[in-house]
Amino acid sequence: MTGRSSQDWRKLTLGVVGLGLIGGSVCLGAAGFRGASRFGSIIGFDADPQARAQAVELGLVERCAPSVPELVQEADIIMLAVPVKAMGQVLRACIELGEQPFAGKIVSDVGSVKASVRACFEAALGGMPASVVLGHPIAGSEKSGVFAGRADLFVNHKVILTPLENTDVDAVAQISALWTLLGADVLEMTVEHHDRVLASTSHLPHLIAFSLVDTLAVQDDSLDIFRYAAGGFRDFTRIAGSDPVMWHDIFLENKTAVLESLELFSKDLQRLRTAIESGDSEQLLGVFTRAKAARDHFGTMLANKPYRQKMTSRELKFVAGPATQLSGAIRVPGDKSISHRSIMLGALAEGLTTVEGFLEGEDALATIQAFRDMGVVIEGPEAGSVKVHGVGLHGLKAAPGPLYLGNSGTSMRLLSGLLAAQQFDSVLTGDESLSKRPMKRVIDPLGEMNALVESENDGRPPLKISGKRPINAIHYDLPVASAQVKSAVLLAGLYADGETSVHEPAPIRDHTERMLRGFGCEVLTEGPVCRLRGGQKLTACHIDVPADISSAAFFMVAASIAADADVTLKHVGVNPTRTGIIEILRLMGADLQVSNEATVGGEPVADIRVRSSRLKGINIPPALVPLAIDEFPVLFIAACCAEGKTVLTGAEELRVKESDRIQVMADGLLELGFASKVTSDGIEIEGRGATSDPVFQSGSVDSHGDHRIAMAFSVAAIRAGGPVTIHRCANVATSFPDFPGIAANIGMQIDITDAEL
Ligand code: S3P
């Protein structure tokens, strides 16, 4: 019941039993932050007569009832904020009101162990009344008592409600609305689930903190220990200052679940002890890097950032402004394709692979997480450095659950090939966009290799991959020009007896082949065919990841279309299978100069200087399409700013990327007053370069959660008449974290807002 108005609350009396920290804070929160009560009346009761008097004096309640039954009679909503141990007594006292003391009332509680509160109700009243909604606010402080109450104690804290099957839905809605009024986020789960979750996340940490402080406190030199205790000790043991009696009760009441998590923890602690004893660095680093990753992930989850399970309740919005002058030299983040492959091949290699310039974007992080889940120790990323402790071709272990790959098509397709050849089964899942993307293109060739990759969703994720199947070498004629499919086949081919070969219908990126060679594998390329013998060992190496040409592309177009621009993009990967963007822009008349050419780890790199130019429309040669496949969203913006017509054909693949990039771009352009003609495999854009400035109207576009669409429209804003608002930009972090920050370095202005959806 979210729609309750303040008028509704004012007709009600709130009764709070127990006026300590939690109960007192409920009273203060319900009274409203400026003391103007949101309720008709707030009354209280506490077993301690002194607390009752103080509560009135402090203004927590208007008055106190002389007994619990009298409070129950008067109140409409009753909050039982008493320790779980006292609950039985409170409920028994209510029996004097009759068999159904809570008839017509709505009742809730705040106890930390829900099964024992439920048992108290059952014992006292013979069952759970439908109007009782058990709950637990995950908020507190080490302080207790009437004086500890705070009106904002629950603001932005979780409250878990644990309704039973017979609980009245309206009662749940009312209690939920009450907690929302106090500023809390309300969620629901079963009693059993609540008690298990809390045993691990709250009860066990308290037990460990109490125990550690006690262990150190009774040592002879305890004074010194505490005097010199580092910040870590203080942070870690803060919760040992909590109320001993309350925690004593909690451990005994949630005995089964607490013992279960204590058992797990004790085993893991014992394993760490053995690892330290035997100097097992792999085991230690494995635990610590996994824990760090999990803790960081937890941090991003709490900050509502999109890593792993995406937070759908928030959206990032970009507001990009027009610009005339762009200048400076920037290095964009590392290449996404190469970053993914550095982790995959590093994990399968023998020895320690070191990576520099790694892209710390969500997609590549998803690949890291997947390999950590499969037991690979990966240190970092730390300022672009990653260390992968390779486990060898046969060293991966089954992940404890499905591998979640976020938005990353590359992770899913390449991992399909690799996992099809393992001795264990795997499940691959992804976010909403990835779950719509076609996977039959890898399922089919892998099937020909005797692998079993299944989708229950018409060839779309989740994918179930069966292990323990011998992989056959094949020759595969790629029906689509896809580097991801080629790579999936080659990775599976590493495990086959004999030679696997792949024919590509048009040149496509060859990072997998180049990197395999870097790891000491023999991969032969003869024209459109590449070949790989199975069973070859990979030897760890160093990988220097160049800046991603796909990210640099946004600034190539930005500098080309801005009135006065001179921008240099440093250390960009210019592998000839990726330079379609440079060739297409040059055909359009762009001023691009390539210098400082070098080769790092088998990949060519160069600096690219871009200056303003008068672009002209062209027919994009179909042969260049696969070589610029990720750059079309921003190329469409270039076409709009060119003189004359640009025609793209043979690009139907764009319809199955992170979004339907042809339609979504055309829709966004229209929102900015620019009509284009969509065709089945491309688009026709009549450029306005010569006739109109600004080229675009100010307006609002939906990126459909597609990173490259969001960045393309940020570039369009350069030539817009006013700000361009771009919705659903959180996924920009998949390939280009801090895009607005780096864009600002050359003079583009992109403001970010983090809004509720
Ligand atoms: C990629 C290949 C391309 C590209 C994607 C990354 C890769 O996809 O669009 O962003 O890393 O192999 P396709 O191979 O499906 O064309």
Image (cartoon, grey):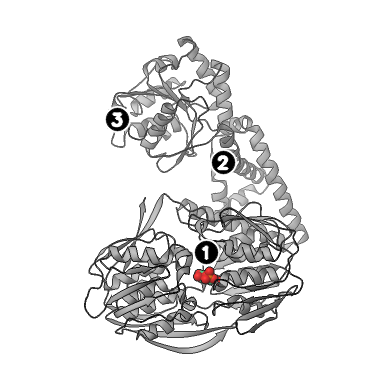
Residue 272 located left or right of residue 427 = right
Which residue carries the number 2 mark? 202
Pick whichever of labels 1 and 2 is earlier in the sequence. 2
What SS does tag 2 mark? helix
Give amino acid for label 3.
Ser
Tell me the distance, in whole angstroms, between the alpha carbons under discs 2 and 3.
Answer: 33 Å
Tell me the distance, in whole angstroms, between the alpha carbons under discs 3 and 1.
Answer: 49 Å
In the rendered image of this protein, does residue 240 appear above or below residue 55?
below
Q: Nearer the viewer, residue 646 or 755?
A: 646
| Mark 1 close to ligand 1, CB under 8 Å | no
Residue 453 rendering spot, x and y as whole percentages: 65, 58
Which residue is painted at 43% across and 81% down in the image? Answer: 621
Local crowd at mark 2 within 10 Å, few (<14), some, or many (≥20)?
Answer: some
Which residue carries the number 3 mark? 37
Which residue is painted at 58% across and 23% down in the image? Answer: 119
Which residue carries the number 1 mark? 363
What SS does tag 1 mark? helix
Q: Is residue 736 among what the camera can see?
A: no
Give amino acid for label 2.
Ser
What SS does tag 3 mark? loop
Q: Nearer the viewer, mark 3 or mark 1?
A: 1
